Amino acid sequence: MAIQLINQAMIVRFFREIGAVFSGSGTIYLVGETSLVVEGLRRFTDRLEFCSSVDLVDRNPFNRAVVQVAGQMGIKVSDEFPGEVIPLPDGYAARHRAVADAHWPFDLPLVVLHFDPYSVSYRCVARGGELDYKVVLDYLEHGWILEDEMIERLELLLPEFSFDTIQQDPAEFRRRMGSLWQMWENRQSHVAVGIAVS
């Protein structure tokens, strides 16, 4: 079965239709590639990733709406709070990002934000897939996160890491961070070479 690629218009349509069938209110936090697609920094993603904050009494109706609309559109969706799978850095809630006005229909009953890019980046590194690293590299490239701040926040966060909190050996996480910085250095080198050639 072919993977249904999801573009910006489809993400907007998904949440518009959720708003049409879900009568409650709440906040949606876009995550990873989904954020990049909404902001026009990527063309497609194969999974719509977000986490949702709705009242407890609205949780089941919201979940049913997600399943219904995703099924109708034939797309994969994931509603996962990053804090359930990795400790989050202090102050993460204050670092959620607004969605650019040009890219979102603000007549929706749901508030839509981008989840704290630093938290998302640590989650991506913990997963360690090629596409996960690319999300973090794009965040760095577009200034959503800063290298020095990412290192500083991580040093404060590392004492909370254990096999239980990140489902892997913390030493493996450090190794993956090293791989990330190598990829970032390589990307910057390629950009510098491109500028020099042009």
Image (cartoon, helix red, strand yellow):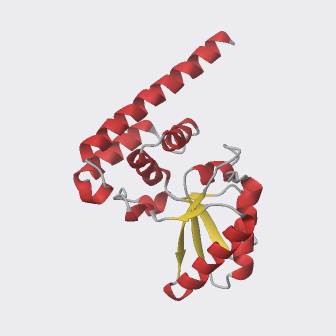
- Identify which residue is drawn at 42% across, 43% down: 128
Where residue 168 appears, as percent x and y from the top left, is 29, 50
Residue 104 appears in the rendering: no
Residue furthest to the front: 1
Percent x, y of residue 15 = 69, 68
Image quarter where the C terminus lies is top right
Foreground pick, 38 / 165: 165
- Residue drawn at x 60%, y 63% as measured from the top left: 77
Q: Is residue 174 above or below residue 18?
A: above
Q: Is residue 181 left or right of residue 99?
A: left
**Residue 92 shows in this picture:** yes
Residue at the image point whose x is 46% and y is 29% from the top: 183
Q: Quadrant of the N terminus?
A: bottom right
Q: Position of residue 64 (x, y in %)?
A: 61, 80
| Residue 185 location (% of width, % of height) | 46, 25
> Residue 100 or 12: which is nearer the viewer?
12
* Residue 43 falls left or right of residue 86: right
**Residue found at the very far bottom of the displayed protein:** 57
Residue at coordinates 46% horizontally, 65% vertically from top-left?
Answer: 81
